[in-house]
Image: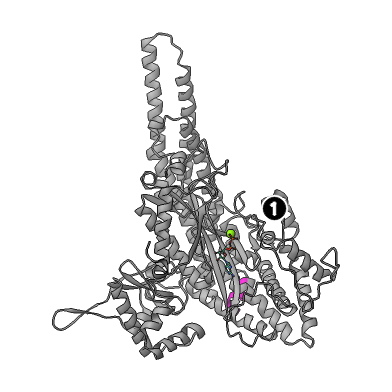
Amino acid sequence: MENLTELFGSKVFNDSTMKKRLPKETYKALQKTIKDGKHLDINIAHVVANSMKDWAIENGATHFTHWFQPMTGITAEKHDSFISPTDDGKVIMEFSGKELVQGEPDASSFPSGGLRATFEARGYTAWDPTSYAFIKGNTLCIPTAFCSYGGEALDKKTPLLRSMEAINRQAMRVLKLFGNEDVTSVKTTVGPEQEYFLVDKEMYDKRPDLIFTGRTLFGAMPPKGQELDDHYFGTIKSKVAAFMEDLNKELWKLGILAKTEHNEVAPAQHELAPIFTTTNIATDHNQLTMELMQRIAKKHGMVCLLHEKPFDGVNGSGKHNNWSISTNTGKNLLDPGETPHENAQFLLFLCSVIKAVDDYQDMLRISVASAGNDHRLGANEAPPAIVSMFLGDELEAILKSIENDEGYDAKEKTIMKVGVHVLPRFAKDTTDRNRTSPFAFTGNKFEFRMLGSTASISGANIVLNTSVAESLKQFADELEGAEDFNLALHELIKRTIKDHKRIIFNGNGYDDSWIEEAEKRGLLNLKTTPDCLPYYVSEKNIKLFTEHKVLTEPEIRARYEIHLENYSKIINIEALTMLDMSKKDILPAASSFIKHLSDTVASKKAAVSGIDCEYEEDLIKKLSALTNEMYEKVNKLEADLADTAQYSDDAQKLAEYYKDTVIGDMTKIRAAADQIEVMTDRKYWPYPSYADLLFGVR
Ligand code: ADP
Ligand code: MG
């Protein structure tokens, strides 16, 4: 492999490239924009654009694009070439400051939830200078935010950037109270661990369900699943290893800090973890990672499945959002410090997260809700749909001692006084032991584990940043007016623990008794996407987002609408795919096999009169019963899908109908089909089996 340090970031217009290529004054002005959010003069943008273009052309680019993240959840780009005609019939390569700063893609084909009236199709993209431009293929990609012409956010980046400003504003107020004179800004950081499956491309191509929906809608369990636990951290197959090597190289070129990779629990399942970085960059990087995973898998004759539940009965895929807050001076605010003073500050930030997760459990649940993730949350493989927090025994004991003014150390009986005592160092392995918690403290950060593998991490981080900003705002309001700061701080922490301790749960989140216990504590258990989405537009949540200027009320209502529509559309596509596969492949295959069996019976009886054909006749009876049953359920699904028309003007009701009626029909069709598969001669079965898919990459 080439020199890794040279390879890293070689396709990124990053700080060191800018320093090298930009005139000193331009570089300084741009830094001001990046670090302090200062407005960038168009003349400076011109210089930056020109330098970016020269660099991009030297690196093989011919086109540029504003790269953005519309509400579809995937990234969008429209390529323009740099060429500009000259009088003598030739071309020169041009890229202006205006083209860098602003673009005008047609917004009419992206989901807007009614924000963009059809007569006003224009939208615009605006450069996000805090995320570096990069080259993908032959195109210079400029990370941008995407808005309607009226300025409403139509994307996932705009509110994320706004939420980072919100938490910066409020955290700075709190940090001032602790006398942190050298700190000028605060950012949240994220390291998202990404799970995925790899399947053989030829087999994938034979499965319409994988092609149209990203998951298998049919498939009986193979003789071997994940029960032996022999895949987790197992030796990586050479084909997969070659893919990973290739992927890493491409990610490194883009400055993405891919660090850890290993096999996951399920066969054919793997994970990639990057080193954490600033939240909006981590979000861009995660989108790119998912895109590259899919592209590079194809080069290796495989397909990367990012769906949350590609296979029934086998673990699904999620994303762990490791999240923390740190200052521009490099201090992680969720890292307990060395002095009583630092510890007091840590405890307050810890409390701000505890309060936020309790107050906004509904929004956190919504931020991970999707048709795909509904298959995971609450099943015995992923965190339950109930949001709770794990702090570890040690930290919980400390909080308890503060709450009750009791000793937390059994031997010393020390009563924890905030601002006086030094906290013990938490051993990482004790804080990280609980794998069933949706939201776990892991020593110096929180790990939010409910995210689905396909989703953009932007939604979850918008909610985290904004809800913690709200806690910090309330804390600052109270402490700024306090006469005795230490006393007020102690009382505030004590009260926060008392008021919000119901959200803390250190036990097994997969246990049924937890569901009962959580209900007693008054925690929400929102099982599905249609169950949780109405909370989006509650008064409390609208107040949160509008007060912190993260989303306006029309933007929130639009997002609620988009989310609902997306859910219904996905189930509808799945249902139609299921009908198609049932009618055109599965039922005909079963019929052919039944005919084969019947012909066999006839010829056996012709050969030997009175011969007993128990095996064939038994199978014919069983298969006929199952195919009749399946046919009936197929007809029911068809009729129920036609009935969706009655909810065409009520997106919430429509989503509930899909959840309650359509999914029920689909489950029954699948149950019959999977039994038919088990009884049918391999030669007649139209699709690669679960065994082929899960163990097909060798
Ligand atoms: P593990 O979860 O396997 O013990 P780590 O705790 O080292 O591994 O890291 C898991 C993920 O958390 C990595 O992506 C890592 O970069 C990220 N991470 C570590 N520290 C922070 C932080 N301060 N903020 C955000 N993410 C972090
Ligand atoms: Mg993890």
Query: Residue 625's x, y, as percent?
Result: 49, 29
Q: Is residue 542 magenta?
A: yes
The x and y percentages for residue 62 are 27, 72
Viewer-proximal residue among 385 and 647: 385
Q: In this view, does 531 lie above or below 189?
A: above
Furthest-top residue in this view: 609
Ligand 2 located in image quadrant: bottom right
> Does the rendering let one see residue 549?
no
Side (left or right) of 339 relative to 69? right
Quadrant location, the N terminus? bottom left
Judge whether residue 96 can be spotted in this image: yes
Quadrant position of residue 551: bottom right
* Mark 1 vs ligand 2: CB below 8 Å: no
User: Which quadrant would residue 498 be assigned to in this image?
Assistant: bottom right
Classified by dominant secondary structure, the portion drawn in magenta counts as: helix
| Left or right relative to 106: residue 418 | right
State the SS at label 1: loop
Give x and y (percent) for residue 220.
49, 38
Amino acid carrying mark 1 in the image = Asn
The crowding category of the residue bearing disc 1, from other C-alpha atoms within 10 Å (few below 14, some 14 to 19, many at least 20), is: some
- Horizontal side, residue 134 vs residue 633: left or right: left
Percent across and percent down for residue 99 are 33, 80
Bounds of the magenta span? 541-547
**Residue 532, above or below 124:** above
Residue at the image position 42 percent from the left and 79 percent from the top: 16
